[in-house]
Image: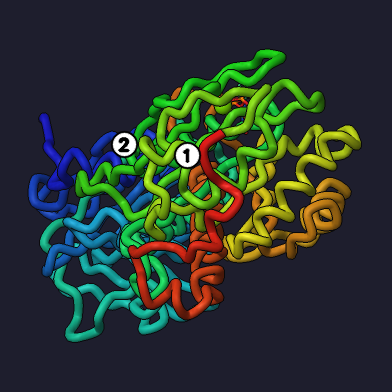
Amino acid sequence: MGVTSRLTWIEEKILEKLLGDASLTLLYQSSVHNNCLLEMTKKCSLQGSTLTVFHLEEDVVLGVFMLEDFPSSDSEKLCNCAWFSLKKNNSSGISALFLNTQVAVDSKDQMIFLNSGSSLFVTPLRGCSLVVDDTIMKELELIPKHKPQTVECEIFRVDGIKKNFSFIKKVMTAEQHRGKLLSALRDYRPYEDLTSEVRILLVGPVGSGKSSFVNSVKSAFQGRLTRQAIVGSEESSITKQYRVYSIKDGKSGETLPFMLCDSMGLEEREDVGLCVDDIPHILKGFVPDRYQFNPCAPFKLKHHTYAATPPLKDRIHCVAFVLDINSVNTLSDKMVAKLKKIRKDVVDCGVGHVALLTNVKDCDEVLDDNFVNMTESVTSLNEVQNVRHMLNVPIGNILMVSNYASELRLEPMKDVLILAALRQMLRAADDAFADLPLQHSASADGSFNESDIENEGEP
Ligand SMILES: Nc1nc2c(ncn2[C@@H]2O[C@H](COP(=O)(O)OP(=O)(O)OP(=O)(O)O)[C@@H](O)[C@H]2O)c(=O)[nH]1
Ligand SMILES: [Mg+2]
């Protein structure tokens, strides 16, 4: 009999992603199989990992992933369970909880989950009311207004996952965290609305992953891989033009209030790569999008072409020093001198700054279990300490990512690092806004002081 799930296609995809790119096959549906316990255990036990989904009233889906085989009729077994709730029409609203529980299907037609002898969750297959422990209700952000009523119970076989519960835990937590980061970034507004958008400048040696970071951020917001910025590996910089990229939210289609500004790669030699003297002009907002960098001659301000006093929104508000983690320890003295010179300009201009380390191998080791702080093993890395001293950036502003390079699909852990890095860049920009001299903050999108443009004029 062909059974169709009550989950929408999108909900099914969200759940498949939540389990680390699994595929779901519907085995049992309570309304179709007449809430029959025998039918349920016959269809679901010995199928490997399963996902039991309770469709509750008020458009809430409550799910239990069981790594081990579904219990057979009138039996009890120990199972690694991951619980989650998903609010329909809100793809980012996933709450999850991981427990090692006894799962039993008893002779009273009930499925029971027990922890240390006390029942956490009871679902009478022939009634409608679930009995859910208060702690679970709280953790899963279910409002205990009244007992949750099941509209339907569906059980899926889960294929294509790693049979490793700690991995599944990590993926599910990452998915959950990704949703939270995305919603926080979608709601982001620049400090005290001083400007309508925040501009983040990416600078760093040739091939360090600046343009790849632009593509990675765009991909994370689009929900699919995008490659607008040209990337590649060559001796000299692939990026030849100054580019200002806006970021679109794939969900709402809206343009978000932050932009990434990509620059030419730095090289050791003086007459190749990004000209360090261009930096103050970029920081102050004089350099237009698509400006063709000239390694031999710094940018010259032409009054008839460019605004003499760019508004605050055209200025750079945060600089990210992009460095490949594998080459941090072998940067030449000349490169370090260039980076330090740029850092001095950045500080002189009152602009926030962070370091972004790319090419990180073990993404799931960077952040702690709560995805909030970097793990101690990461902060004590030689590379991290070197960057801290070289650029004088606090540990909290040393960010790590693994850009999308040759992947075929998005990965939750990568997205988490990319989005967390972006959020920290915006925080650094906000700190700089908070520190702006009063006349700047008062004129929001207005002009700078004359002092901002002194020494600039026709060549
Ligand atoms: N595996 C991996 N590859 C990366 C990462 N970041 C960049 N790459 C690769 O490194 C190469 C250079 O990346 P780009 O993004 O072009 O570097 P860039 O800093 O923009 O380089 P220029 O514009 O030439 O200065 C490309 O082949 C990328 O695919 C990363 O985090 N992980
Ligand atoms: Mg580039």
The foreground one among 41 and 298 is 298
Relative placement, left or right, of 33 versus 162 is left
Distance from label 1 to label 2 (Cα)? Answer: 51 Å
Above or below — where is 205 with respect to 170? above
User: Cβ(mark 2) to ligand 1 < 8 Å?
Assistant: no
The foreground one among 405 and 5 is 405
* Mark 1, residue position: 287
CB atoms of marks 1 and 2 within 8 Å? no
* Element marked by disc 1: loop
Relative placement, left or right, of 39 versus 136 is left
Which quarter of the figure is the N terminus placed in?
Answer: top left
**Mark 1 or mark 2: whose residue is earlier in sequence:** 2
Q: How is the image coloured?
A: rainbow
Give the residue at the far front of this rendering: 458
* Mark 2, residue position: 24
Residue sitting at x 56%, y 53%: 421
Relative placement, left or right, of 171 versus 65 is right
Whole-percent x and y of residue 400?
65, 47
For ligand 2, give the image quadrant: top right
Q: Mark 2: which amino acid?
A: Leu
* Element marked by disc 2: strand
Above or below — where is 10 with respect to 441? above
Report how many numbered discs are placed on residues in the image. 2
